[in-house]
Image: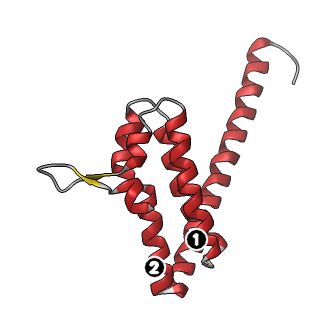
Amino acid sequence: MARVLDDLIRVPLTRRTVGLDPLIGLVPGLGDWAGWAASAHLLVASARLGASAPLILRMAVNALLDAVVGSVPVLGDLFDLGWKANRRNLVLLESLVADPAATKRSSRLLVGTVLIVTFGVTALTAVGALLLFRWVLRVSGLPL
């Protein structure tokens, strides 16, 4: 499935390959979500094979990034050609089979880092919004 979505056809005179995912993505609106549905199928199959929650989450981030950025007209289609989330997810699944302990550690580390960075950005945004709100109140002369 990953090969069909990301590497089905070799581009003549190059080493590049293209699959159905970026081609389906050319259909406005529906195409990117069809690609996401196919990626979701790979996530479900990975869970059935016994992939850990951190690995599934890591794979979901790859697929979600592909779907979100891929939904941007033109730029998203170019992104789809290079990102190849399904191939990345297949490599993650193969690494799980080859070395389950190392894959589990690296997935936990990545997921932990993403959560910490997300929390940090959210906290900084909230503090910035509060400071901006206080500044607007001060400039407008309204009581704090």
The mark lying in front, picked from 1 and 2, is 1
Between the residue at mark 1 and the residue at mark 2, the CA separation in whole angstroms equals 12 Å
Element on which disc 1 rests: helix
Where residue 138 sits in the image (x, y, percent)?
A: 77, 20
- In percent of the image, x 53 and y 85: which residue is there? 100
Q: Nearer the viewer, residue 131 or 89?
A: 89
Image position, residue 59 (x, y; %): 54, 63
Residue drawn 43% across the image and 63% down it: 88
| Amino acid tagged 2 | Ser
The residue under the point 47% across, 71% down is 92
Looking at the rendered image, the quarter that the N terminus falls into is: bottom left
Which x, y percent locates residue 120? 65, 52
Determine whether, in the image, residue 84 is placed left or right of residue 9. Answer: right
Residue at image mark 2: 95
For the C terminus, give its image quadrant.
Answer: top right
Tell me which label, 1 or 2, sits earlier in the chain.
Answer: 1
The residue nearer to you, when weighing 117 against 55, is: 55
Residue kind at label 1, given as amino acid type: Ser
Q: Residue drawn at (66%, 71%), measured in percent from left and top?
A: 53
Q: Nearer the viewer, residue 19 or 144?
A: 19
Q: Nearer the viewer, residue 49 or 72?
A: 49
Quarter of the rendering containing residue 107: bottom right
Image-based side of 19 in relation to 144, left or right? left
Assess disc 1: are there few (<14), some (14-19) or many (≥20) residues with their C-alpha within 10 Å of its C-alpha.
Answer: some
Residue that mark 1 sits on: 46
Q: Is residue 136 above or below residue 48?
A: above
x%, y% of residue 30?
A: 54, 35
CB atoms of marks 1 and 2 within 8 Å: no
